[in-house]
Amino acid sequence: MKGDSPSIAALAIGDELLSGEVLDTNLRSIAVALSRLGLVVTRHVTVPDEIDDIVRDVRLMAATSDVVIVTGGLGPTSDDLTTEAVGKATGSALVFHPHLEKMLRDFFGSLGREMRDENLKQAYLPEGAVEVPTAGGTAPGFMIEYDGALIAVLPGVPREMESMMDSHVMPEIEKRFPASETTTTRRILTFGLGESDMAGLVADRIGAGPVKYGFLVMGGPIVVKLTASGPGAAAVEAMLDDEQKKVEERLGKLIYAVGDETMEEVVGQLLREQGMTIATAESITAGMVSSRLANVPGSSDYLVGGVIAYGIGEKTKVLEVPDELLREGAVNRPVAEAMARGARELFGTDLAVSTTGVAGPGTGGERKPTGTVAIALSHAAGEMSLERKLPGPRNMVRNIATMAALNLVRLHLVDPGRAEHFEPDTPEGRE
Amino acid sequence: MKGDSPSIAALAIGDELLSGEVLDTNLRSIAVALSRLGLVVTRHVTVPDEIDDIVRDVRLMAATSDVVIVTGGLGPTSDDLTTEAVGKATGSALVFHPHLEKMLRDFFGSLGREMRDENLKQAYLPEGAVEVPTAGGTAPGFMIEYDGALIAVLPGVPREMESMMDSHVMPEIEKRFPASETTTTRRILTFGLGESDMAGLVADRIGAGPVKYGFLVMGGPIVVKLTASGPGAAAVEAMLDDEQKKVEERLGKLIYAVGDETMEEVVGQLLREQGMTIATAESITAGMVSSRLANVPGSSDYLVGGVIAYGIGEKTKVLEVPDELLREGAVNRPVAEAMARGARELFGTDLAVSTTGVAGPGTGGERKPTGTVAIALSHAAGEMSLERKLPGPRNMVRNIATMAALNLVRLHLVDPGRAEHFEPDTPEGRE
C-alpha cells in the first residue's frame, strides 16, 4: 500500500459531466460499494473527453493510489477515448478480441439490428488487461496493473457500471485489501423533529462512547449516523447494536427505519403484517402519497385506491366532505378528517390517509398562510389528524407533507392504542 | 488568461461527497450557470475535509486556471475548514468582521434561538477577500485573488451556492471574460421515439450546416441539442432559429417543448389557453400523472381531481368500468378507455387521462408481459388510447407511462381533429 490504509482514487471522464448536461451519480455508487469494505474514495476528479487529460490523470492517480476506478468513455463513438488513453497511460498496445466482436454482433442481432463498424472499437482492450464482461450494454470494462496500482475501467452508464463494479471490481479489491479494521456506519432514519432538536435528544450520548454520531438532513427526514470501528465485523456490529438501543430509548417512535428502507417500505411492511388495506385522499400532494406507496413491489396487496380532490367541489362530491366544514376553508383538521373518512368509506379499506394544504406560491384564496398542511388518518375507531406550517418552496412543502402523511400511517400501525391522545411533533424541513 | 480560452476549475470539499452520503449536484449547477457565458468547467476535483488536501488543490488549480470555484466546508462545525485552508493557500490571515457577527446573531434571533459560540468562526474571512453575502444560510462566501486566478468560495448547500453564484460570482466572471464568441445550445425536447430513430429523422441535417447536433436520452424523452457559435448573440440565435425550423419540419408533434419546460408545464399551458379542465384515472402510475400536473403552480385552475384505482374492484366500483371488460384482464385499451371515461364523468371535466399496466416484477396475474401499459384519453367526442410494452425495471416503466399519458393529453390539445386516426409512436426508454 502507498499509505497507512488503501488509497482509492476515482476518475470520471466525459464532457457531458463538466458541461452539466449529465449529473454524475457514479461517485456515489462507487463510494457506497467501497463502504461495505470500510474503504473510502480519497480523491475524485472529472476530466473532459481529451486523451491528454485522461493519460495524465490516470498516471497521477496510479502513482499515488492503490486502486484507480475510471468510469466513462467506453462507448462506440469518436469521443469515447478511454480505452485508448488508458492503453497509452500504461504503455499497453490495444489488442483485438474476436470473442468481443462476436458478443457485439450477437447483441445487435438480438435487437434485430445491424452492427455499425464503429462499434468494433469496443472489441479492443489494452494488452495484459483482464476483461470485465458487459452488464446489459455493449461496452466491456477491464482491469489492468500499472505503477503498483489496480486500474479498473468501467462504462459510465450507471446501471452497467454498478453491476460490473459489484461482480468483478469489488471482489478484486477485497482480495487485495482484506479489511483489518472494519468501519461500519449505521443509519437511523427519523422523522418528526428538526436536526438540532433530534441531536438535542441524543446529546448526552455524543462523545460518551466509542461510537461516533453524525446527522444528515434529507428534507424532512433526519438521519442519525452511528459509526464504529473495530477489529472485526462482529465486534463492530455489537457496538452499533448497543448504541442503537440507546438511541431508540431516546428517540422512540421518531425512528421509522434503520438502514436504507424508505418510509413507504416501512408502511407497506406494517400494512402487510397486520393484513390491513389503505386508501388515500389527496389534495395538496395530488397523488404523491399513493404513488410513493405504489413504489414498493407488491403494494397492490394493500393499496386499494385513492381520490385526488384538487378542487373544493371534489372534496364535497367524491369524498362527501360536508359543505359546512368547507365554509372555514379547505385547509384544517376537520376537513382532512372528513376526506380520510370519505376515502375509507368509498374504497372500503381499513385505513385511509388524507392531505390538504396551501402549497404556494400564493394562498389561492385560503385563509391559512402558504405552507400550511392538514393531514389525517381514518381508522376503524375514528380519526387522528395534525395541522402544521411547513417551510420552503412549493414542492418542498408537498414532499414533506407526503412524508408526514405516510408517517402518520406508520405511527398508527406501530401503536394504535395511542390514536386518542396523539400529539404529533413538528416536521421541520430544510434542503 | 492562462490558455486560449478562460480556464475554470471547480473544487468540491467534503467527506460526505466522497463517502457517497451526499450526491454532489453543485458541479452541474455551476456548469449550467457558466454555459450561459459560453464557458465550461475544465476540471473538477473532490477532496476530503482535510486542510492539506484543500491547500494543495487550491494552489494547483490557481496556478493553471483563471477561475477556481470552491464549494463546501463553510459551516460552523469543526470539520468545516475551507476558510482557514484558502487563507493558508493564499497566504492571507483571517480577519474578524463585526458586521458578520451581527448578521449571525440576527439570523439566530429571528428563529428565536441563541447563537452558539462555534458559529462565530463564520464571521472570519481571509484578508483581502471580498465578501459574498449569504443567501438564506449562515455561511458567507468570498472571492479572493491569488496567482492570477479569481478564487470564489461558496457554501456547499445547493440552494445557497446557486443563489450566491448567480448574484456575485457570475457577474465578476462575466466582467473578466466578456464573451468574444457566443456559443449557445438550444434543447428541443421530444417524446415518442427512441434515440436512434429520432436521430434518423434529422440525419440529413447532421453536418449539413454550421449548427452542431447532439442527442441526450432522459429515460423516455430524447433531447435534440442544437449548438451554434458566432460573433454575437443575435447571429447565433438566428442560426438556431433556422435550424430549429428544419428540426420542426422533420419531427413535428414529436417535439413537446423547446428549452427547459417540463411536459406538465406544456400540458398545463395548453389546458389553460383552451380553458379546459382535466381529471385522472391511474392504476400503474398510482398518482404520478396527477402529481406531475400538480407540480405546476396554479394547476388547480385546470386539475380538478383523480381516482387511483389500484385494485380491479375499484376500476369497476369507482370508475364504473364494466365487469365484462375486465374479464380479459385489466391491462388493455378498452379498460383504459373506460377508466378515462369514468373519471371524466365522475369529475365533470372536459378531459380525463388514464393509465393501467403491469409494472413488475412479476405480472400479478395479468396475461400481458411485465412492462405492458395501456393509456387512454377521454374527451367530448370519444376516447383515444394506446398500448405499449415498455422496457426497464418497475419504476422506469411507471415513469415512462406517466410521460406517455401526459404526452397523449398534449397530442390531443395541439391537434384535436386527429383523435380519430391517432397512431401513436412507441415510446422507447433507456437509462
Image (cartoon, coloured by chain):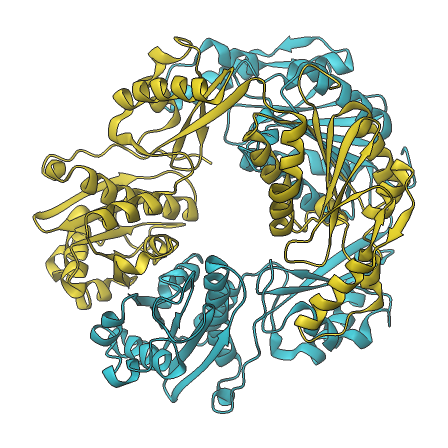
Chain colours: A yellow, B cyan
Tell whether B119 sits left or right of B43: left
| Residue at far bottom of view | B421
User: Which picture quadrant has residue A119?
Assistant: bottom right
**Residue shown at the point (46%, 58%) measured from the top left:** B395
Q: Position of residue A345 (x, y in %)?
A: 13, 62
Horizontal side of B256 relative to B265 (left or right) equals: right
Quadrant containing the C terminus of chain B is bottom right
Residue extending farthest left = A381
**Total tally of numbered discs in the picture:** 0
Residue beneath the point at 87% across and 44% down: A127
Q: Is residue B59 shown to the viewer in this render?
A: yes
Where residue A313 sits in the image (x, y, percent)? 22, 66
The correct choice, above or below, for B88 with respect to B324 in the image is above
Which of the 4 image quadrants contains residue B226? bottom right
Residue in the picture at 81% in, 26% down: A148
Q: Is residue B203 left or right of residue A391?
A: right
The residue nearer to you, when weighing A164 against A292, is A164
For the N terminus of chain B, give its image quadrant: top right
User: Vertical placement of B418 versus B166: above or below?
Assistant: below
In this rendered view, identify the residue nearer to me: A323 or A169. Answer: A169
Front position in the image: A241 or B65: A241
Residue at the spot 25% in from the left edge and 45% down from the top edge: A270
Residue A193 position in % (x across, y down) = 32, 29
Residue A368 in view of the camera:
no
Residue B30 location, x and y as percent?
67, 40
In-front residue for pair A315/A239: A239
